[in-house]
Amino acid sequence: MKKTAVITGITGQDGSYLAELLLEQGYRVVGVTRRTSTQVNERINHLEGRIELVSADLLDQSSLTTVLRDAQPSEVYNLAAQSFVPASWSQPVLTGEFTALGVTRVLEAIRAVDPAIRFYQASSSEMFGKVAEVPQRETTPFYPRSPYGVAKVYGHWITVNYRESFGMFAVSGILFNHESERRGLEFVTRKISDGVARIKLGLAKELRLGNLDAQRDWGFAGDYVRAMWLMLQQAQPQDYVVATGRTHAVRDFVRLAFETVDLPWEPYVAVDPKFVRPAEVDLLIGDPSKARSKLGWQPETSFEQLVERMVRADLERLSRVVSV
Ligand code: NAP
Ligand code: F7E
């Protein structure tokens, strides 16, 4: 019989890649969307007819319980969150409701419907924040630097707690930054790839950014959803760091992106204090040894391939717009 998986956050970057992977694996995929006045599910439109969409919200306990009761999944992937770090300073309470308490609501829905359902929580390297060790691994202490990071620490520990309190198969994947051509335009990598493509096509004259010195361990989202799935296929529920083990400054991403279109970056990039954060996470680099040895997971896309892929995708997309 087909396995059923429920994905919260299916309309997001990771939700779309995970849905594709689970369909390939033969799953019935049920995606949770929240009601909006316009339904623009651009990341999953190509999956229409192959996935089922149901309505629920992380703020609403009964909607989550109803979704699980109706879908009867064996796996739940909780990818939904307010995921943009700067927005967590302007909407700290809402971020806590979605990104922290929302996890408890999903866990409570599982407990009420079927405690045997396997649960994946989308935890984040932002929990390491002001890093206590380099590289960061599963045992590195947390020191979050934003309301988002704080909320994710809560989500992580409530997942661990439900595993230990109720014996649930609940795991926390501590994923480092992962990107793609489906990344939201407000995140720095996509902002750069989109900005570079616009400049190349004559649609923009400059790219305004914040801190160019911040270092991130960037991977490709399509590789990372495989690790999520693998975590739920193990005999024992455990937490894993998922990363490439390499770090680069924002400046490196900028330079490579401009190189892709044969332009120097310096004349086009301006630093705008508006994009500098009240507290920064300066350096992230993950140690994916445990994921490699226990899950057999490793990233397949290099940093250089990721940058090129994103710039080329934005060039192609914007060229179509220009030629209309
Ligand atoms: P994303 O593109 O921002 O997607 C977030 C998803 O959450 C969207 O589908 C969004 O729905 C949904 N959502 C937000 N609030 C909701 C609510 N109240 N009820 C129901 N759904 C809600 O994020 P992503 O990059 O795919 O990341 C997926 C998860 O991994 C997030 O939890 C993120 O915090 C975490 N994470 C991401 C990274 C990364 O580098 N991408 C790294 C570590 C952890 P709408 O479309 O309606 O807005
Ligand atoms: O920033 C710097 C910024 O917004 C990366 C989320 O998916 O990954 C993501 O969080 C770095 C930061 O991602 C701009 O200061 C410079 O140091 O792309 P970002 P993030 O904050 O690392 C983690 C793992 C998550 O869990 C989150 O959900 O880039 N930066 N100039 C800029 N950042 C933005 N957004 N815009 C700029 O203009």
Image (cartoon, grey):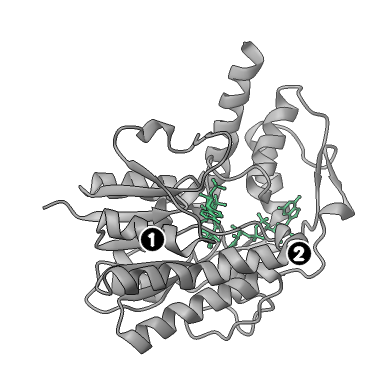
Q: Is residue 49 above or below residue 281?
A: above
Residue closer to the observer: 24 or 252: 24
Q: Quadrant of residue 231?
A: bottom left
Q: Residue at x 26, y 70 (%)?
A: 114
Locate ligand 2 by image quadrant.
bottom right
| Residue 191: x %, y % from top left | 69, 43
Q: Residue furthest left?
A: 1
Q: Residue furthest top?
A: 324
Residue closer to the observer: 190 or 218: 190
The response on whether ligand 2 sits within 8 Å of label 2 is no
Say what secondary structure mark 2 lies in: helix
Q: Is residue 96 above or below residue 24?
A: below
Q: Residue at x 76, y 22 (%)?
A: 202
Marks 1/2: CA–CA distance: 26 Å
Q: Residue at x 34, y 64 (%)?
A: 297
Read off the residue under disc 2. Answer: 89
Q: Is residue 272 above or below residue 97?
A: above
Point out which mark residue 77 bears: 1
Left or right: residue 167 compared with residue 134: left
The residue type indicated by label 2 comes to Trp
Q: Quadrant of residue 71?
A: bottom left
Q: Residues within 10 Å of mark 2 (few under 14, many from 20)?
A: some
